[in-house]
Amino acid sequence: MTRPWLLWLPLAVIAFIGGLAIYGLLVPKDELVRSAMVGQKLPQFALAPATAGVQGLASSDMADGKPRLLNIFASWCIPCKAEAPHLETLKKAGVEIDAIAVRDRPEDVAVFLDQFGNPFRRIGADNEMAVQLMLGSSGVPETYVIGSDGKISYQHIGDIREEHVPMLLEKLAEAK
């Protein structure tokens, strides 16, 4: 006795695999890793200064009731260099910006600040990436809006560009 459906089985398997391949090509993949800390209180930390001439950063430094930006950067990061003028624009608009330098050497941070300016109030050194991981940050640069209540209200993944400045100012106004 023959089983005619067995003849169609290989074709069905090939069609199924082909359908999966087409689905994978047509549906865009979200490669951004969003932090689960958005909406949560800023975790407790205390970081030493990232270079000479700057103050280190602790979570308690951001508990003064004012909204601010927390920028995660590194001197070796090309997009961090590209966002530097836009951070300066935010500083000129009255925004307080604190920073965490990730896996960086003090002399490299100093050169970065000399070349691209220093819009930061304080810069902590996170050489082990412990605070970066506590924040749920997956890379550099990333910027967080810290509300006046000490909660993380927004996460901006990637470099800040000119078109992002008004949106970040709005997010800071909402975080008061």
Image: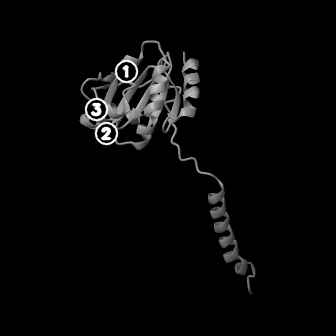
Marker disc for residue 55: none
Mark 2 touches mark 3? (CB < 8 Å):
no
Q: Is residue 148 above or below residue 133?
A: above
Mark 1 touches mark 2? (CB < 8 Å):
no
Judge by depth and name the residue closer to the eye, 26 or 75: 75
Residue at the (37%, 17%) spot, across then down: 61
Which is nearer the N-term, disc 1 or disc 3? 3
| Residue 144 drawn at (x, y percent) | 48, 29
Judge by depth and name the residue closer to the eye, 75 or 66: 75
Name, please, the residue furthest toward the top: 65
Q: Is residue 7 above or below residue 59?
A: below
Nearest-to-viewer mark from 2 and 3: 3
Q: What residue is pinned by disc 3?
A: 110
| Residue 60 drawn at (x, y percent) | 37, 17
Which is nearer the N-term, disc 2 or disc 3? 2
For residue 41, say whether it is visible: no
Residue 21, picture quadrant: bottom right
Nearest-to-viewer mark from 1 and 2: 1
Residue at the (58%, 19%) spot, across then down: 174
Distance CA(mark 1)–CA(mark 3): 14 Å
Marker disc for residue 103: 2
Q: Residues within 10 Å of mark 3 (few under 14, many from 20)?
A: some
| Amino acid type of the residue tagged 3 in the rendering | Ala
Which is nearer the N-term, disc 1 or disc 2? 2
Helix, strand or loop at disc 2? loop
